[in-house]
Image: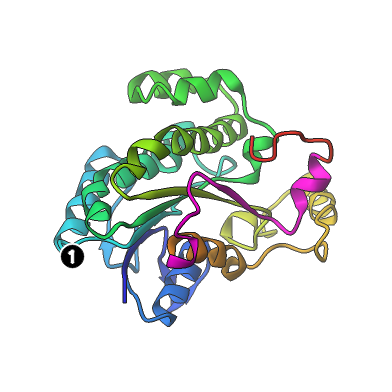
Amino acid sequence: MGIYAVTGSALTEGRPTGIGGALRRLLEADGHDVISIDQRDADIIVDLSTPAGRMEAIAAIHERAGEGLDGIATIAAVSGATSGNDALVEVNFFASIELVDGVRDLLKKRGGSAVLCSSHTFVLMPKEDLVDLYLTLDRDKIIAGVEERSGMSVYASGKKALVMWMRQNVPAYAADGIRLNTVVPGFTDTPMTVREGRSERELEFYDDFQSKIPLGQRKGKPEEVAAGFRFLLGPDASFVNGVTLFVDGGHDTTLRPDAREFSA
């Protein structure tokens, strides 16, 4: 069986609460070894919001999977509603691209794959100047540039930049036999979307937003989104490369019914 690394895959009292934990359980149920990475309740406990923490995670993955990785899924993320802009840049963007790049040699050994986690906000509310800023990969410049911007625009723009980074790097990684893809979760039942503590205005937005999901007018379940990651990581997706997979119950079709570009 395979060996996979998954960020944002902590378990609470042995149970997943988010997409990363759900993917961890799916892969383990398939008989794979999973290296879980998170701030708690994981094999590798690190703070991905710092360059030092990311380097520590990369070194620990090498120690545990020296013979190679079959895949990595970078799902760890923080919310624009609850985190500062610096954390959005560090965790949502740099933790993904640096970990993928940092284990590229391990993926090459097994012809593995990497799947990044975007968000359906990346087609709704990104700011193109911020997307371009992210794609400079200049960490200090990005941190300075997002200082006065709204958390949601920084979040959405970073998620679009992840998709763009993935697409830009597909040919180079493919030369090493590595596939790159992205999953776009829709409105999913995770700690980021809990109703507790929300204002009346936020709850009205949530209800309206959810009502536009064609498949059942409900949130997605973490395991439903995780199944998209499992597919893209696995051998059944051996010729799937450079894809942006929406797992959103069809939400994008109601939010952007006239879209002519389906992933950007």
Q: Does the segment drawn in magenta span residue 194?
A: no
Q: Nearer the viewer, residue 35 or 141?
A: 35
Residue 116 in view, yes or no? yes
Q: Which residues make up the magenta segment?
A: 235-256
The residue identified by callout 1 is 64
Quarter of the rendering occupied by the N terminus? bottom left
Residue 114 horizontal side relative to residue 65, left or right: right
Near mark 1 (Cα within 10 A), the count class, few <14, some 14-19 or many ≥20, is some
Task: Establish if 60 lies above or below 243.
Answer: below
Residue 92 horizontal side relative to residue 225, left or right: left
Disc 1 residue type?
Arg
Quarter of the rendering occupied by the C terminus? top right
Residue 251 horizontal side relative to residue 80, left or right: right
* Residue at point 31%, 46% (across, down): 99
Q: Position of residue 221 (x, y in %)?
A: 64, 68
Q: Does the segment drawn in magenta span residue 239?
A: yes
Residue 75 horizontal side relative to residue 72, left or right: right
